[in-house]
Amino acid sequence: MARLRRMMMIAGVTTSVAIAVLLVAIGYRLFRGDGSTASGPDLTATLPKGARIVATGTAGDRLAVTLDVGGATEIRTFDAKTLKPTGRLRFAVEP
């Protein structure tokens, strides 16, 4: 009987410690205040007249936007953190 009581005490203490650790971790994340919820800058990218966004994608720290500009395809890339343009690739059709 004493052995069972000792095992139950160990299980109870272990469970209590686990719950305490979980509550501390949740409290730490809630009250840390590192500004992770701050939104990025609001920017407006101007597109050529008649252009249409076909697709978007990310690759590492780059944002790629595929455009259809009057039947020609164009890919523009932007830095994901600053949203500054980093490149433009145009595809032309041979006559």
Image (cartoon, rainbow, N blue to C red):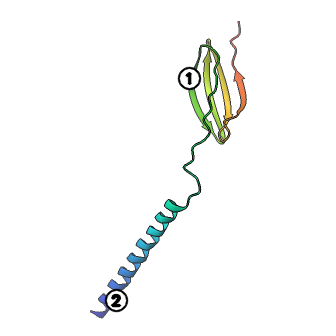
In this view, 30 is above or below 4: above
Give the crowd class for mark 1: few <14, some 14-19, many >=20 residues within 10 Å.
Answer: few
**For numbered disc 1, what is the local secondary structure?**
strand
In the image, residue 80 lies at what x, y percent? 65, 39
**For numbered disc 2, what is the local secondary structure?**
helix
In the image, residue 61 lies at what x, y percent? 66, 41
Q: Residue at x 57, y 43 (%)?
A: 39
Amino acid type, residue under disc 1 in the picture: Val
In the image, residue 71 lies at what x, y percent? 61, 12
Which quadrant holds residue 82? top right
Residue named by callout 1: 54
Q: Residue at x 32, y 91 (%)?
A: 3
Which quadrant holds residue 47? top right
Image-based side of 40 in relation to 16, left or right: right
Residue named by callout 2: 6
Q: Residue at x 58, y 53 (%)?
A: 35
Mark closest to the chain's N terminus, 1 or 2: 2
Identify the residue at the far bottom of this view: 2
**Rendered-image quadrant of the N terminus:** bottom left
Identify the residue at the far top of this view: 95
**Rendered-image quadrant of the C terminus:** top right
Amino acid type, residue under disc 2 in the picture: Arg
